[in-house]
Image (cartoon, coloured by chain):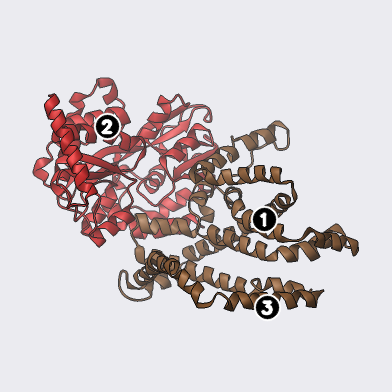
Chain colours: A brown, B red
Amino acid sequence: MSTALSSTTVPVRRRFKLGPGARGIKLLIPVLLLLAVFFLVPVLALLLRSIMEPVPGLQNYVELLGSQTYVRVFFNTFMVAGVVTLITLLVGFPTAWLLAIMPKRWSQVMFAILLLSMWTNLLARTYAWMVLLQQTGLVNRVLMAIGVIDEPLTLVNNLIGVTIGMTYIMLPFLVLPLHATLRAIDPSTLRAAAICGASRWQALRLVLLPLALPGIASGALMVFVMSLGYYVTPALLGGTGYMMLAELIAQLVQSLLNWGLAGAAAFVLLVVTLGLYAVQLRYLGGGRSGMGDR
Amino acid sequence: MNATKQIRSHIVLAAGIGMLAAMPAMAENLVFTSWGGSTQQAQQKFWAAPFTAANGINVAMDGPTDYGKFKAMVESGNVTWDVVDVEGDFAYKAAKEGLLEPLDLSKLKGVDPRFLSPNAVGSFYYSFVLGYNKQAVKGAAPAVWSDLFDMKKYPGKRTLYKWSAPGVLEIALLADGVAANKLYPLDLDRAFKKLDTIKSQIVWWSGGAQSQQLLASGEASIGMFWNGRISALQKGGAPVGMSWNQNLTAADMLVIPKGSKNKAAAMKFLAYATSPEAQAKFATDTGYAPINPQAKSKMTPAVVKTLPDQHVAGQINLDMKYWADNRDAIAKRWYAWQTQ
């Protein structure tokens, strides 16, 4: 079975790479131009500022990487993004699976609920969490009323608040691509696993998860990268102990007018993120053919 | 009367068509940028609308004020803002960096000299006051900044302004016993040491609405607030109180960005906005104090009593010049301390 799978996937991949050829690239030109003008040029301008302001040189990078504060903020940023990605995965995978297997009428309702949350203003949603999670908020009151806790829990202005708020916002970005992947999986593969004697856990671990890996990887990467640059939610639900880079950059740009340092910070974040993307492409991008060998 | 109105509306229409046709800007338009919310609504209602009625100059609203955008406009030469409401220390800093047009001071009559400089004139002035939730504090109401640091007498979370800006450090030093006239230059080591004593109990607010939410809900029992925000809560019936002892004052300033295309109209607007009538109406609505002392004769005594400038006993002026010169260095220490 494994050889059959890989022998069919390989030609497909090759055709995809060579088939559309030059004509496909021509069609891409407007998009590439748009990206160049509105993305690449500003990024280069930013890079230029980071090495030209206030005087030419690398002093902004020296300051950024030499200061404990900034290094700590970098660490926080990646740590929070990592935690959010993990929790989003733990919540998002069962959700996507449920959406994929439930009757269409119900899954449409679930989708509507999921998407509706995306159409509501981000600030309003974040404030809603603040009201729900604070010490005098609904969550604490209910927990105290039913006797689970005696003292209100601190659920906002710390890592817990940021994680809850951001996981909620990121969920659709994981569920949508993952749902597409899961839908494409033939349910009979799971039946086959059961017939071959696999337990439910084995079927999940050895069949479903490997097949879903591309969807998991792309969804998780999207969540992770979006979390890295998030501003509103950490600013409102997080304490300063976990200040994230976007907050610091906003301060440097809007308030302190230190664009050189802000540019350097943004650029370092961009480089690290692209590096992670490259790693993901290298090790997980090939997940589809890798799984055939199992 | 009707005829002039009609003519005026024709002028407005013509100006609109002119802008649509992307002709060079007509002289009789300007863009006013402020912080949004109830403050800017009051500025529109009591400054812009009567100004347009009297001079036929249209005032378009934009916002919120963003110093990054401000600087980018001036640097690129594409200045679309004509009058901007900024914080005091930014006004000094921007003047030093050459981002502002000089003002025609002869047109700004009666303004308190504290709020007048070659490049900026006061917009309104406010105080940081001690605010508390009446249901959350027991016994005598907190009155001075040292109460904010007294965890035994007033337990619960405290809420302070999140960003590196005039206010929090001064409060810490005052609470630690530094005399009001010995505040500057700020003793940063001492201030941070004092803040360390309550650090785990601080919930930071990053905007006015958030500060109101934290106090009104009881999430924080005590904290520092813009006086207008507490007044608004009280008007809404929330169980909150404030103490004017050691209130810290600062003014917002109005400036014209360098390269403004409607400088003459902008100058006329500044003259109107700082006039006694406009200042009186704005102050009555917002609870912030007028920067033109003559405005008080045009307000009811009851309203005058609620303004920050009635609490001069123990009032402390935040030193914006000091902050403009030291903001970068303080910010470094601030964020290092906050993220620890």
Amino acid found under the numbered disc labelled 1 = His
Checking the image for residue B45, the label placed there is: 2
Amino acid found under the numbered disc labelled 3 = Pro
**Decide: marks 2, 3 in contact (CB < 8 A)?**
no
Callout 3: few (<14), some (14-19), or many (20+) C-alpha neighbours within 10 Å?
Answer: few
Q: Is residue A65 left or right of residue B285?
A: right
Instruction: For mark 1, give the secondary structure.
Output: helix
Q: Which residue is mark 3?
A: A11
Callout 2: few (<14), some (14-19), or many (20+) C-alpha neighbours within 10 Å?
Answer: some
**Decide: marks 1, 2 in contact (CB < 8 A)?**
no
Q: Is residue B327 left or right of residue B46?
A: right
Q: Residue at x 63, y 78 (%)?
A: A14
Q: Chain for mark 3?
A: A
- Quadrant that contains the N terminus of chain B: top left
Q: Residue at x 61, y 43 (%)?
A: A112
Vertical order, B219 against A277 (above or below):
above
Instruction: For mark 3, give the secondary structure.
Output: helix
Q: Chain for mark 2?
A: B
Vertical order, A266 against B266 (above or below):
below
Amino acid found under the numbered disc labelled 2 = Lys
Q: Which residue is mark 1?
A: A179
Callout 1: few (<14), some (14-19), or many (20+) C-alpha neighbours within 10 Å?
Answer: many
Where residue A218 sits, quadrant-wise, is: bottom right
Instruction: Identify which residue, B167 or B42, lies in the foreground.
Output: B42
Q: Residue at x 51, y 72 (%)?
A: A24
Q: Position of residue A43 (x, y in %)?
A: 40, 68
Residue B58 seen in the figure: yes
Instruction: Identify which residue, B65 or B151, lies in the foreground.
Output: B65
- Marks 3/1: CA distance? 26 Å
- Marks 2/3: CA distance? 69 Å
Instruction: Identify which residue, B289 or B265, lies in the foreground.
Output: B265
